Image (cartoon, grey):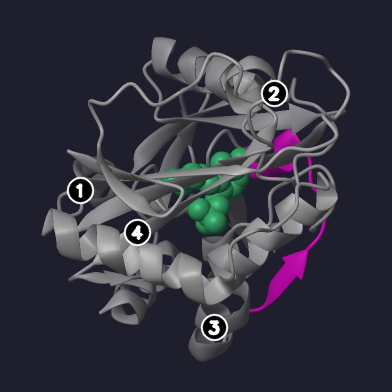
Amino acid sequence: PIGLLDGKIIDLQENIVPMEDRGHQFGDGVYEVTKVYNGYCFALKLHLDRLYRSLRELTIPAVYTYEELVEFHALLIKESGIKDGAIYLQITRGVSPRAHGFPEQVVPRLTMSIRPVSAVPDKNKVEGAKGLLIPDERWLRCDIKSLNLLGNVLGKQKAKDAGCFEGIQVRDGIVTEGTSSNFFVIKDDVLWTHPTCNLILTGVTRTLVIEKIAPELGLIVVEKKFDEEFAKSAQETFVSGTSSEITPIIALNGQPVGNGSVGPITHKIQDAYWKLID
Ligand code: PDD
C-alpha cells in the first residue's frame, strides 16, 4: 500500500511518524476522509473547504494550496491504481519537542493514504442497520474535524459491543449525531437533523442531502434540535457520511423504527445519492 508524505509518494510500511509529531502526542491536527468512485474523488472541494476551516480554527498554518491538495489526491489514485476507495488525509501542527503550548517555528506535516473500498453497497446499506443511543461524551468543538477522536472511538465501540452499526449520540437530552456520521429522522414526511453548530460536524454528505437531494425530491428539511423520544417515534431514520453514504437505521436500542425495514423516503434519498456519485 502507498501513501504520501508532504507531497511525495511513500511506501506505507515505512516508519514515518516521528516520536515528537504533535499529531502523535497530542492529537494536534486535523483530517479528512474522501471517497473515490470510479477513479474520481467525490465532493473534494467541499472536503477541502472544511479542511481549511478546521486548520483556521486551530491556527495551524495552511501551507498547501487548494490546487496542490487536489493534485495529491489525483496522484494517490493514479499511483495506486485504485478505482474505488477512500483517501485519508491528515495535517498535524508538526514536529517539535513535547510541550503543550504551540511551538514557535514549526512546519505542519501532511500525510495521506489510500485504500480500496468495495463498489458494491454492503448489507447495512441495503437492508438497514441498527443504531444505539449513547451519551455524547465528546468535547465542545465537534465542528472541527480534529484528530482527537477518543469520544467517537469509545462511542462506536459501545455500539459494536451491543451488536449495532452506529452509536447515535445524545447530549443534554438532544440527539446530536453518529460517532462517524450525521443523523436524520423523518417525521410526517419532513426531514429533521441537528442544526450546524459546535456540537456536530457539518458533514459533506449532510450538506448534499440538505442542499441537493431534498430539494430535488421535494422534501422539506428542518435543521432543529430533537430528543430521543422524537427519534424513537420517527417514521424512518438514517445516517449520512462519506463511508456510511446513506445508511438506513431501522432499529434504535433494539426497538424497530417505523415498521423496522428501510422506508420509502430513505430509499429515495439513497437512490438520489447514488445518482450524484455516478
Ligand atoms: N466520518 N460526523 C462525524 C462525527 C464524522 O466523523 C463524520 C465523518 C460525519 C460525516 O461527515 P462527511 O459526510 O463529511 O463524511 C459526521 C468519517 C470521516 C467517514 O464517514 O468516513
Residue 64 occupies quadrant: bottom right
Q: Residue at x 45, y 34 (%)?
A: 251
- Circle on res. 35: 4
Cα distance between the residues tagged 4 and 3:
18 Å
Q: Secondary structure at mark 1?
A: loop
Determine which of the numbered discs, if any, sits on residue 91 in the image: none
Q: Nearer the viewer, residue 86 or 72?
A: 72
Q: Which residue is mark 3?
A: 212
Q: Which residue is mark 1?
A: 117
Ligand 1 neighbours mark 3 (CB distance < 8 Å): no
Q: Is residue 19 above or below residue 17?
A: above
Inspect the image, locate mark 1, and give the three-letter code of the amino acid beneath it. Answer: Val
Q: Which quadrant would residue 101 be assigned to in this image? A: top right
Q: CA distance from mark 1 to mark 4?
A: 9 Å
Q: Residues within 10 Å of mark 2 (few under 14, many from 20)?
A: some
In the rendered structure, which disc, 1 or 4, sits on the residue that comes first in sequence? 4
Q: Residue at x 31, y 73 (%)?
A: 271
Disc nearest the viewer among 1 and 2: 2
Labels 1 and 2: the sequence-earlier one:
2
Describe the element under mark 4 as helix, strand or loop.
Answer: strand
Q: Which residue is mark 2?
A: 96
Distance CA(mark 1)–CA(mark 3): 25 Å
